[in-house]
Amino acid sequence: MEETKMATFRILDAAQTAEKLPFADLIEALRIGFSVGCQLPERHHHTMHRVGEPDATLLLMPAWTNPEDKAQYLGVKLVTVVPGNASRRLPGLVSTYMLYDGLTGEQLALMDGNTITGRRTVATSALAAKYLSRPESSRLLVIGAGRVGSLIPDAYRAVRPIQEVQVWDMNAEASNRMVENLRSNGVRAKVVNDLQTAVGHADIVSTATLSTEPIVKREWLRPGTHVDLIGGFTPKMREADDHTISIAKLYVDTPEALHEAGDLVQPRESGLISETSVLATLADLSRADRFARENSDTITCFKAVGSGLADLVAAKLVYRGMKEG
């Protein structure tokens, strides 16, 4: 009987993981991934009780390819949330991603989960913008200059002719740092303090905050703006006001957004919108693979909460790039 050779196991740090996820390739991989789908069981949520500090949390987020897919993969994202780390001056959230051969169960690679999450998050929004924002959109406003927000311009530049990036954040140091990084890479960028004027100037407004109060207001938006809500991922978080949500053409990454994101949960509970207000998911857009905007004056809004499918797509892309050298 012929002996089967075991797969080579690799460990990739944050820089190595990011290197294998160029945005143009990742966005196309996500288009295919959302079109095909995968198996997504419910995530596991475990509380770890602590003494003398807030409880910690362990999240296990599995996903695997469909049985009929030619290449079989299984992935699990492991996330630890430790609020007590603030007093230790350590990150409160640490994430790793484990990719397996879906047929044999062999370990293939351990990757930096924060990198996987950050890059697939902004690439998901960029994929939606490919279908929803005006093709000539060149002015991007980024609200929130943190780890995820700082990735937004590069992702959007893969799908739209972005010529100007404006950055707003409550933390001036974060805004300045992001703008300096963009300028060092040849991007025309500036920090803005007047958010109302900046929103009215932008073709695309992308938010990546943890706000619990609306930041983007309908009266500030000019016709044809595409609003991309990345940050709010709990029912208590809000980034856009009710008026924006009620008049915009709404799209989501997955149906779970209607039940998890405050930008949709709160207007639903008040009767302002219903489930039928959402015109399509990203899977619908990807399968159709055509421009979905009705006209140049429509305000479109995409709300994402993240998915294990996108994590698995990104991990598979990293692994393929690793094998190719």
Image (cartoon, grey):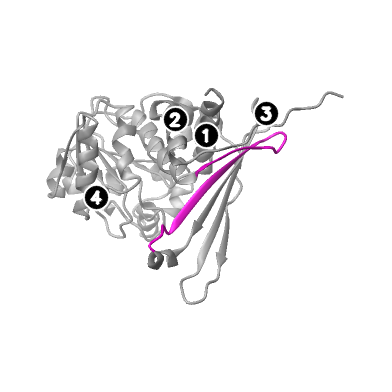
Whether the magenta-drawn stretch holds residue 79 is answered as no
Q: Earlier in the sequence, mark 2 or mark 1?
A: 2
Figure check: 3 above or below 124:
above
Residue type at mark 4 is Ala
Whether the magenta-drawn stretch holds residue 104 is answered as yes
Figure check: 77 above or below 102:
below
Q: Earlier in the sequence, mark 2 or mark 3?
A: 2
Neighbour class for label 4 at 10 Å: few (<14), some, many (≥20)? Answer: some
Q: Quadrant of the N terminus?
A: top right
- Residue range (magenta): 89-112
Image location of residue 117, percent across then percent down = 45, 43
Q: Label 3: which residue?
A: 68
Residue type at mark 2 is Leu
Figure check: 265 above or below 161:
below
Q: Earlier in the sequence, mark 4 or mark 1?
A: 4
Residue drawn 15% across the image and 38% down it? 201
Local secondary structure at mark 1: helix
Neighbour class for label 2 at 10 Å: few (<14), some, many (≥20)? Answer: many
Local secondary structure at mark 2: helix
Quadrant of residue 224 within the rendered picture: top left
Q: Label 2: which residue?
A: 26
Local secondary structure at mark 4: helix
